[in-house]
Amino acid sequence: MTESLATIGTRPLPEETHSCWSCGSMRAAHFCESCGKVQPPQPVDYFAFFGLPPKLNLDVATLEKDFYELSRRLHPDLNARGGSRVQEWSLEQSSMLNDAYRTLRDPIKRTEYLLHLEGMELEEQSKSATEQARATGEVKKQIVPPDLLEEVFELNMQLEELRTQKKMGEDDPALIEEIGKQKLALEEKHEALLDELKAGWKAWDALIDRGSAANAVERAQITGQMVDVLNRRNYIRNLVRDVNEALES
Amino acid sequence: MSSDHIVGIDLGTTNSLVAFMQGETPVVIPGEDGSNLVPSVVALDAGNQPVIGNAARNLLIETPERAVYSIKRLMGRGVEDIQEELKLFPFRVAEDLQPGEVLRIRLGDKTFTPPEISALILRQLKRNAERYFGEAVTKAVITVPAYFNDAQRQATKDAGRIAGLEVLRLVNEPTAASLAYGLDKKQNGIVAVYDLGGGTFDISILKLHDGIFEVIATNGDTHLGGDDIDNLLITIALDDIRGDLGIDLRRNAEAVQAIRKAVIDAKIALSAQPSVKLDFELPGGKRYQREITREQFEQLIQPIIDRTVGPCKQALKDANLKPEQIDEVVLVGGSTRIPKVRALVKEMFRREPHTDLNPDEVVALGAAVQAVILGGGSQATQNMLLLDVTPLSLGIEVAGGVTDKIILRNSTIPASATQFYTTQIDGQANVAIHVLQGERELAKDCRSLARFDLKGIPPMAAGIPRVEVKFLIDANGILNVSAREQRSGKQADIQVQPSYGLTDEQVEGMILDSFDNAEEDFRRRQVIEARNEAATILAALDKGKKSVAWAELTSDEKKQIARMEKVLVAAKDEDDYQAIRQAIDALNQGTMRLAELMMDTAVSSALKGKKMDETDLGEGPTPPHPMAPPEFQ
Ligand SMILES: Nc1ncnc2c1ncn2[C@@H]1O[C@H](COP(=O)(O)OP(=O)(O)O)[C@@H](O)[C@H]1O
Ligand SMILES: [Mg+2]
C-alpha cells in the first residue's frame, strides 16, 4: 500500500536561473545571495539540494559545514519575522535540508537513497516489515542469501532450542557459547560486506565521473550489485538482532 | 507604545516563570508578590474568581476541592491514560465526561480542560510581564519537556492561545536551558542537560558549535519528578497514621494537602541538612512526628531516581557517544538540588555536573533568549541558532496493526516524510490513515495522534490513484499533514480527527483575552489596578491621620495633603489611568514626611512599607512599577 522511501522529485538540478522574488537580483538555489531572502523550494533530489553530483563517496565534514551554513539561512527561527509566504518556504526548505542531510551523512542511507532514485527496490528487512508479515501471514519479500542457507538453518535450530530451554528455565552454557561464536562470525561477514559495498561506491562514482550516465546497462549492473550486497547485509543484521533477542530474553 | 516584547515562559509542572532579554541579559520578571516563581497552582476563590500562584497554594490547603496543581501531567492526555495519576493526585475528573471528549477537571462546581487551567497560569505570567513593561504583551515562546508528544505540545499551544498569547515557538526545556548556558559560556563542545523537575524528566545531548546548538539525542519520561518523591512520602505517612491511630486520612483532602506541604518542606530541608523532623498536626489535635535522616531518604528515593538512568543511557546510545565524550553536564530543575541526584549524575557521566546556573530559572531565561532570536536577534544572540529534534518516532498504521515508522526519533526538525497511497477497490473515494507516535512495533502500543480521511479521490480503478501524503514535523515538534492526488493533481481533502485535544473552534470559544482586545483589556486592567492602589494609599492615609505623627505636620502640609487626597479621590472614579497614576504619585510624594514621622515614632508600619517599596524601585531591572502595593492592615 505504501512506498517506503520518500521521493523528492526529478533529478538533476534544474539549471535555469531564477531571480529573487524579493529584490530581483540573481539568487542562489535556496536563498538570495544579494538580499538573503528565502526562495520558494524547488523539487530537487537530496544531492542536488546540496549542489552535489550524485556520487556515493562524499566528504561528511564539508557536508556538515554546508548544512550549518544553509541552516543559518533557511531555519524558521531566523525567518520568523518574514510574511506567511516566507515562513512557509522556510519551513519547507529547512525540512528538506534536514531530510537531505540526515540521509546523505550516513553512507548506508545515502546508498539506499541513490538506489531508490535509480528505481531499485530493496527487500523489506525492516523490523516493522517483519512484524507486518508475521501479523498478516504474508510472505515477506526476503530471500535467504544462498551462501548462508546452511548456516542459517543450523543457527535457527539452535535458537529454537535456546528458546525452549529458556522457557523451561534451563541453561546450557555450551549452546550459548556455540550461538555466540556464530554470532561473531555473522558480524565479521557484516563487516566484510561493507568492503564490497565500498567497491560498489567506487565503481558508481567512476561512472558518474566519466559522464557516461547514459550507459544504462553499466548503471544497472553496478546498482544491481549494490542492491544485492545491501540485501545480504540487512539479512545478516536482522539475524544478529534475532540472536541478541534470543540471548537476552 | 508598540515596542514588541516577546517573552519567554517556562510553564512548569510545579513552578512557572516569565522572562525577557533586558539589553543583552535575560532576566526573570517577578510577580505581584515579588517572587520570581509562580507556583503552577490554580484555585477558585469564594467568588468563583480564579486565583493563581502563591495565593492559590494557600487555598489548596484551605479548600482543596477548589484548587488544582500539577495540571501539566494531564496536558494532551485522555481519561484512560491518567488512571495511575488519579490514584496519586487529587484531580477531580468531571463526572459528565463523554467518551472521546477532552478531559475536564472540576474546581468547585465548575469544570475546566487542562489547557484552560494552564491558560490561567499563562495569563497570570502575561499580566506580570504587562505590569512590568507597562504595555500589553501578546507574543511568547513557551517551553515544553523535550519528551512531550504531539498531543501534549498541541495542548500547550492551545493554552497559549486561550491565554491571549501568540505562541511563536515551543522550545524544549533542556534545549532552552542550554541556550542560557551557552550564552554565558560561548564554548564549543558536547553538553548533556539533565532536567529533573516536579513532574517530568528530560535528558538532552547537544553539540555546541560556533553558536549552533544542535541537539543530537533526547530522551526522558513525562511522568517522573519530585512529585513522585512527595507521593511516596505522603503514602508512608498515611500508612503510618492508619496503622498506628486507625484513622484513614486518604479521603480527607485538607489533611492530605497539609501532609503534602510538610513532606515537601522536609524533602527540601534534607537537601541541605543530614536529618529533618517531619512534624505536622493531625485532625483532632495529635501531631505526627518522625525523624528522617538523609541516608534513609536516599534509600527511599533510589528506585525513583534510578528511573532516570535508562533514558540517559538510551540518549547516549542514540547519540553514539560514550559518557567520557561529554564535555559538560548541566543540571536543571528543582529536584537536581537533591545531593543523591547529583551523585547519580556524576557517576553516570563521570564528571562533576555544572551547577552555576539557577536550576529553577535557567529554562525561562533560555526561552527569553530564543524569543530574541525569533524577534530578529541582538548582539548577544548573534550567530545563535537552535537545531532541535523530534523525541519520538512518527509512524503510520499498516496492515496487521503494525507501525511503519516514517520519521525516526532524534531527527532534526523541521523534518518530513512522504507516503504514497492508493485504493483497494474500484471507485473508492476515501482512504483512512492512522498516525502514531512512539517506538513500539505494534500500533496499539504507540500513541495515537490522529486519524485522517483522505476524501474526494477521483473515481478510478483500484490501485490507480496515487495520493501523495506529506507528513511534516515543524520547528515546534508539531505534525502537519497535506495530501495531493498525483494523477489528477487534485489537492485531497484531509479531515483531521486529533485523538486527543481540542478543535480549533473549541479553542476559539475558550479564549480568555481576545487578541484584538489585548491592548484595550490591558488598559482596563491597568485602571483597575491603579484604583486598587489608590484605595490602599487612601486607607493608609486615614490611618496616618489618626496617628500621633499627624499632629506634628504643619497646617500647610495638612492642607496640601488634603488637596492631593481630594484629587486622587476624584481621579479614582474616572477611567483615566494617567490621571490616577499621577494623583497617586503626588500623594505619595506629599505624604513622605508623614511617613518619616510615623516611622520615627514607630506608631505604624503602614506608610513605612510604602517607602521601602520606593527605595526598591531603583534596584533590579528598572521596571516602571515592579510590585503591587503592600497590604496596609
Ligand atoms: N532544595 C530542594 N531539594 C529537593 N527538591 C527540591 C528542592 N527545591 C525544589 N525541589 C523540588 O523540585 C521540584 C520543582 O522543580 P521545578 O524545576 O520548579 O519543576 P517544574 O519544572 O516541574 O515546574 C518540586 O518537586 C520541588 O519539591
Ligand atoms: Mg522545569
Image (spheres, rainbow, N blue to C red):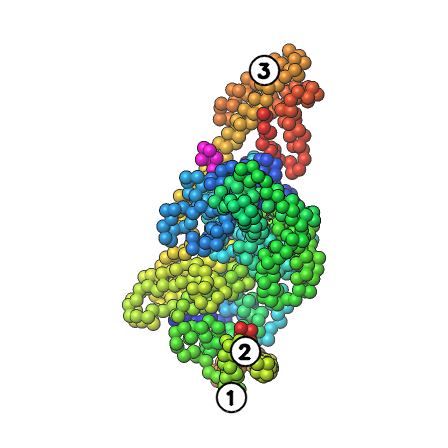
Q: Secondary structure at mark 1?
A: helix
Q: CA distance from mark 1 to mark 2?
A: 27 Å
The residue singled out by tag 3 in the image is B562
Prevailing secondary structure class for the magenta stretch in the rendered image: loop
In the depicted structure, whether residue B622 falls above or below residue B346 = above
The residue segment tinted magenta is B42-49
Report the disc number at residue A127: none
Amino acid residing under circle 1: Glu
Chain of the residue under the numbered disc 2 shown in the image: A
* Residue A181 belongs to magenta span: no
Where is residue A128 drawn, in percent x and y? Answer: 46, 71
Amino acid residing under circle 2: Glu
The residue singled out by tag 2 in the image is A170
Where is residue A185 drawn, in percent x and y? Answer: 59, 83
Tell me if residue A204 can be seen.
no
Q: CA distance from mark 1 to mark 3?
A: 106 Å
Viewer-side residue, B543 vs B206? B543
Within-10-Å neighbours for mark 2: few <14, some 14–19, many 20+: few
Mark with earlier residue (1, 2): 1
In the image, what residue occupies the spot 34% across and 69% down? Answer: B423
Where is residue B231 drawn, in percent x and y? Answer: 55, 50
Q: How many marks?
A: 3
Do the residues marked 1 and 3 share a common chain?
no
Tell me if residue B251 can be seen.
yes
In the image, what residue occupies the spot 50% across and 76% down? Answer: A167
Report the disc number at residue A150: 1
Where is residue B421 drawn, in percent x and y? Answer: 38, 68
Chain of the residue under the numbered disc 3 shown in the image: B
Do the residues marked 1 and 2 share a common chain?
yes
Viewer-side residue, B318 vs B563? B318
In the depicted structure, whether residue A17 falls above or below residue A189 = above
In the depicted structure, whether residue A96 falls above or below residue B116 = below
